[in-house]
């Protein structure tokens, strides 16, 4: 059932950033301030395994019992086939008004934010709230390149405060695949941090032969050309360097990064090495600003 | 114990292409003709699990009992840490004379061919015999670019009939990782063959953002932009296209391919799409020509 007109006006609401493996819940007031928040591992996969749509309704009832009997807006994989209900993607370009107009009422006083699609062949669920919120809160300009590193790294081009286009790179998943399942695995046990090995990887990513450079991680360790404990940082530099270059970052690019401190430091270093400038944005603050903006558009109409 | 001078002159010899999971054994006469051959799954991993060096000696005794009590020359992963004995790599550039001079006598009348290393950070074991043999048999010119597609695709630059330099791309392993362990896995169930989906992948590989293009395989299937049954062929085109471009293949490149028919067809199509010309070389004939050349250099001195 798409969004109807039966919203109760409320001073406060509950926002859920409901991802695949984790979720974060916020109690937000009318001004967009967070009054309470908690994070747990009741992500979509965990809840879905326990019993389909009814399990999601039970989860929301438990959240209301804990934080208040308030309207709920949820974003993320909760709107996917594995989630509570399959909410159709909204096509780019899309801003907060389009998203607010396409909220999906999955239960009384309970809405799911639609994900976005890029017609060139890309999808996101949940990241769009952070992107819009970063601009709405003044943490990034209305026309900017935003980057959300992670398992699937999103690069979004914002225009006039809306998401104009975006592309996803499987950077984090690739590193995990190599570390867990590949012939490189035994060499990828060292720490990953910015430093000479990481930067050599970023530099080598400029050669454009990623599949060859990755095999070289193993060969260089076998030949004693690189210490085994440096191999993981080098591989990370290759992947993040490829990601940053593939996104077109070059001299004088400005990139607004929504990242945890570790990935934020790695991407900042790689972006600087490619001649660009990285600006760190608080992704929790961006999410709350984005969901509060969407809620205000719904509440006020 | 490196090669000594106690070789028995013999009309015939046994050659073993002893890889990680399989091996192929040839009974070869003085003229380099194959009198008998068999292939089985007694690769290095299988034999090594059953009991270290003694198990390899038992395997060779069984081969001699079957094909004749003859000198044995083995190439491949049998010379690695997981094999019979760790045989040091020979550095490029290296030709048949250097390899013949560095044979490793692992047991009486039993030698292992050393692998090659590229000082820029690459290694091979076994492929060098095919490379040298392809040129020696006149299947490829003495100065040429040779390609051995597979789990780890080798690209070798031959100069004057010797291996001047080479690079390895983890193309086949990457496809297997994606198909078995990644979030793309559920979409990579269709057939892989040359066709529109494969060629679209080769074309898209020219954008240089491989990690993004791979995520797009999933997104395009979710959005209905590409049929799920075409996704595996498309992903294969992305990976092989990246491999071919990363090797520098362009207009008027000639590439001599040592490949099975399926990979040979895919690489031929990708090379042609990049403007190059592929020439198929029989890799079994190349191996036998190479090992016979090495044997003749040892036997005659």
Image (tube, coloured by chain):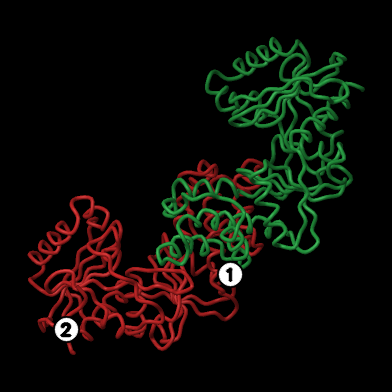
Chain colours: A green, B red
Q: Nearer the viewer, residue A31 or B180?
A: A31
Q: Secondary structure at mark 2?
A: loop
Q: Nearer the viewer, residue B94 or B27?
A: B94
Q: Secondary structure at mark 1?
A: helix
Decide if residue B44 is on the left or right side of residue A269: left
Decide if residue B49 is on the left or right side of residue A80: left
Q: Going 22% across and 56% down the picture, which residue do you hit?
A: B42
Image quadrant where one finds the C terminus of chain B: bottom left
Query: Of the residues under marks 2 and 1, which one precedes in the sequence?
Result: 2
Marks 2 and 1 sit apart, C-alpha to C-alpha, by 42 Å
Q: Which residue is mark 1?
A: B273
Q: Going 70% across and 52% down the picture, which residue do you hit?
A: A268
Decide if residue A135 is on the left or right side of residue A1: right
> How packed is label 2: few (under 14 Cα within 10 Å), some, or many (20 or more)?
some
Residue A61 in percent (x, y) is at 67, 12
Q: Going 47% across and 55% down the picture, which residue do you hit?
A: A229
Q: Which residue is mark 2?
A: B30
Q: Which mark is residue B96?
A: none
The disc numbered 1 marks a residue on which chain? B
Image quadrant where one finds the N terminus of chain B: bottom left
The disc numbered 2 marks a residue on which chain? B
């Amino acid at each position: 059932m798409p969004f109807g007109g039966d919203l109760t006006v409320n001073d406060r609401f509950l926002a859920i950033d409901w991802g695949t493996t984790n979720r974060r819940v916020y109690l937000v007031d009318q001004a967009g301030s967070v009054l309470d928040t908690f994070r747990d591992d009741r992500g979509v996969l965990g809840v879905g395994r326990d019993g389909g749509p009814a399990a999601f309704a039970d989860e929301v009832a438990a959240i209301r019992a804990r934080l208040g009997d308030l309207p709920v807006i949820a974003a993320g994989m909760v709107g996917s086939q594995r989630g509570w209900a399959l909410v159709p993607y909204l096509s780019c370009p899309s801003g907060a008004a389009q998203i607010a107009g396409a909220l999906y009422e999955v239960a009384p006083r309970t809405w799911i934010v639609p994900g976005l699609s890029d017609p060139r062949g890309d999808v996101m669920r949940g990241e769009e709230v952070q992107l819009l919120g970063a601009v709405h809160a003044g943490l990034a300009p209305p026309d900017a390149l935003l980057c959300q590193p992670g398992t699937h790294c999103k690069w979004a081009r914002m225009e006039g405060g809306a998401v104009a286009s975006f592309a996803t790179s499987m950077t984090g998943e690739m590193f995990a695949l190599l570390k867990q399942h590949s012939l490189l695995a035994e060499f990828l046990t060292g720490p990953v941090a910015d430093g000479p090995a990481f930067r050599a990887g970023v530099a080598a990513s400029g050669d454009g032969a990623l599949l060859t450079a990755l095999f070289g991680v193993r060969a260089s360790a076998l030949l004693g050309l690189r210490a085994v404990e440096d191999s993981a940082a080098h591989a990370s530099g290759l992947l993040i360097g490829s990601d940053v270059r593939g996104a077109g970052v070059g001299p004088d690019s400005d990139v607004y990064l929504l990242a945890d401190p570790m990935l934020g430091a790695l991407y900042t270093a790689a972006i600087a090495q490619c001649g660009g400038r990285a600006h760190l944005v608080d992704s929790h603050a961006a999410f709350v600003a984005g969901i509060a903006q969407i809620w205000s558009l719904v509440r006020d109409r």
